[in-house]
């Protein structure tokens, strides 16, 4: 028997999916702008953030409205509570894409310090993690959520490699590279932060589906994987 | 501390089995809610605890109901003592057509002998204070109880119960005839009362069960499907049937 609230929960699901798609697009474009030295695209990421903010507010309002009108329980309550948290994580991810776009604008007119290899790789991981995390939420798929958690260590390793290379091979050897190297360091850090936010989403999805809190419980996380 | 334990409790109305193998524990100084669809046996279970079902013809029970370790289903249980110890509040408040004062002392007058006026006065004051009605009614004690508002009548019925110093308060849909504000005040009263009594409430209002109780049991077709901490039952029930019921997917 389909309940009236089911239709509204489906709408909420769609909105969060849209929010995820917009965040994913913002990450992709922000790094494309860096790779292609495309000032216009970087500005586009910054300007589009307002739309993501608006959608965040819409999703929040819908969640509060659902709680007020239906007083949801059990899986409905967990779905809405998780939806609100994921909404905030996605908005933060989009803000970080704006940070990347702003760093890009700082260095877009200067020659590239080095060919970009690892940053696009890290971007691909971050984008993939966002996509998987959103899919996990929309489908209630624990397997996908766990995949996201497993991907995070790869992101950390890549970020450490980027940091090591930029510091040891550039900044230490030639101090004049520091201003450009710092921007790339920050971008790598931002991408890694995006991955951290997606792991939060994955942990929330596990709570939503299994009613088990693994956040801040490393032992449960280990068992779960 | 556990106040009431049921062990393999079964109850039949003639050939119809209304309770099936109920095993449960009700803690002292806690509010336990029993929820479930109409006809699931929750009111029947409540009425087992003070043997109110005995008044219905053709009722048969098996198993044990231990209150303070004594099986109240034993044939030699003194029902007057039991019902003094385990009192009940009903869906519709049912004060006697007497004054407020006489309603409250009714039980004490029946149960006791040679009770002084001072002692009765004290009972009235203590009981009305216990249900937060003293300030409102202390100057109207001789007025007919039937003139009170629904909420005041329900509180008065609770005061009438606690006047005979029970241990357990059974509440069968105690707020179903009250408006939201009165409901909220009665729920506050329940939270106050649980410091002194074991409270078991049957309710169709799941938000009320979630708000007010410490433990919750879900019943379906005479079975106790799930019993646990209220926050767990309402956020992460272990049984799909409980989840379907509390999310409104049941049926």
Image: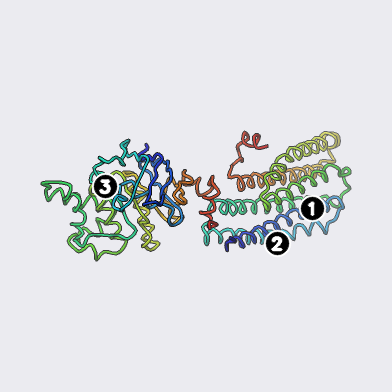
Say if labels 2 and 3 share a chain.
no
Q: Nearer the viewer, mark 2 or mark 3?
A: 3
Q: Quadrant of residue B96?
A: bottom left
- On the image, the x and y values in percent for residue B87 come to 29, 49
Between discs 2 and 1, the one toward the N terminus: 1
Neighbour class for label 1 at 10 Å: few (<14), some, many (≥20)? many
Bin the neighbour count of mark 3 within 10 Å (Cα to Cα): few under 14, some 14-19, many 20 and up. Answer: some
Label 2 marks a residue whose chain is A
In this rendering, position of residue A165 left or right of residue B45 = right
Q: Position of residue A6 (x, y in %)?
A: 60, 60
- Cα gap from disc 1 to disc 3, whole angstroms: 74 Å
Q: Secondary structure at mark 2?
A: helix
Q: Is residue B183 left or right of residue A121?
A: left
Q: Which residue is mark 2?
A: A51
Q: Secondary structure at mark 1?
A: helix
Disc 1 vs disc 3: which is toward the camera?
3
Residue A76, percent from left and from top: 57, 54
The residue at the far bottom in this view is B147
Tell me where residue B145 appears, x and y as whole percent: 23, 62
| Label 2 and label 1 in one chain | yes
Chain to which mark 3 belongs: B
State the residue at coordinates (37%, 56%): B173
Whether tag 2 and tag 3 are in contact, CB under 8 A, the answer is no
Say which element carries label 3: helix
Q: Which mark is residue A94?
A: none
Which residue position holds label 1? A30
Depth check: give the residue in front, B226 or A157: B226
B34 sits left or right of B59 in the view: right
Image: B216 above or below B204: above
Chain letter of mark 1 equals A
How far is mark 2 from mark 3, CA to CA? 65 Å
Q: Which residue is mark 3?
A: B83
């Amino acid at each position: 028997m389909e309940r009236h609230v089911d239709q509204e929960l489906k709408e909420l699901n769609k909105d969060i999916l849209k929010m995820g798609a917009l965040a994913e697009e913002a990450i992709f474009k922000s790094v494309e702008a860096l790779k292609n030295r495309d000032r216009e695209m970087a500005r586009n990421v910054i300007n589009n953030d307002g739309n993501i903010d608006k959608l965040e507010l819409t999703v929040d309002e819908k969640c509060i409205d659902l709680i007020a009108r239906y007083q949801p329980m059990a899986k409905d309550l967990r779905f809405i509570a998780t939806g609100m948290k994921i909404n905030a994580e996605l908005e933060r991810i989009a803000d970080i894409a704006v940070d990347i776009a702003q760093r890009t604008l700082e260095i877009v007119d200067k020659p590239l310090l080095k060919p970009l290899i690892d940053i696009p790789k890290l971007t691909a991981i971050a984008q993939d993690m966002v996509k998987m995390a959103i899919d996990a939420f929309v489908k209630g798929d624990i397997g996908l959520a766990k995949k996201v958690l497993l991907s995070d260590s790869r992101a950390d390793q890549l970020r450490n490699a980027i940091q090591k290379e930029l510091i040891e091979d550039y900044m230490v050897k030639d101090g004049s590279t520091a201003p450009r190297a710092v921007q790339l360091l920050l971008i790598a850090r931002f991408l890694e932060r995006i991955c951290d936010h997606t792991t939060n989403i994955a942990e929330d999805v596990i709570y939503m589906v299994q009613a088990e809190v693994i956040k801040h419980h490393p032992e449960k996380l280990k068992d779960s994987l | 501390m556990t106040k009431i334990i049921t062990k393999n409790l079964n109850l039949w109305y003639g050939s119809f089995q209304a309770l099936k193998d109920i095993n449960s524990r009700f803690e002292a100084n806690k509010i336990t809610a029993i929820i479930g669809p109409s006809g699931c046996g929750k009111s029947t279970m409540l009425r087992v605890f003070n043997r109110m079902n005995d008044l219905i013809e053709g009722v048969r029970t098996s198993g044990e109901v231990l209150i303070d370790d004594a099986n109240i289903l034993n044939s030699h249980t003194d029902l007057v003592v039991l019902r003094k110890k385990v009192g009940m509040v009903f869906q519709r408040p049912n004060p006697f057509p007497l004054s407020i004062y006489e309603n409250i002392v009714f039980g004490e007058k029946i149960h006791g002998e040679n009770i002084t006026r001072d002692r009765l006065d004290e009972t009235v004051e203590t009981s009305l204070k216990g249900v937060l009605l003293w300030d409102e009614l202390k100057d109207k004690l001789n007025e007919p109880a039937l003139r009170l508002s629904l909420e005041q009548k329900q509180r008065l019925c609770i005061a009438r119960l606690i006047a005979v110093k029970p241990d357990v308060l059974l509440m069968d849909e105690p707020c179903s005839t009250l408006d939201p504000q009165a409901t909220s005040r009665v729920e506050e009263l329940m939270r106050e009362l649980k410091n002194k009594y074991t409270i078991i409430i049957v309710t169709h209002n799941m938000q009320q069960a979630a708000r007010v109780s410490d433990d919750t049991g879900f019943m379906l077709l005479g079975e106790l499907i799930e019993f646990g901490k209220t926050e767990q039952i309402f956020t992460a029930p272990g049984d799909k049937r409980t989840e379907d019921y509390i999310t409104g997917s049941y049926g």
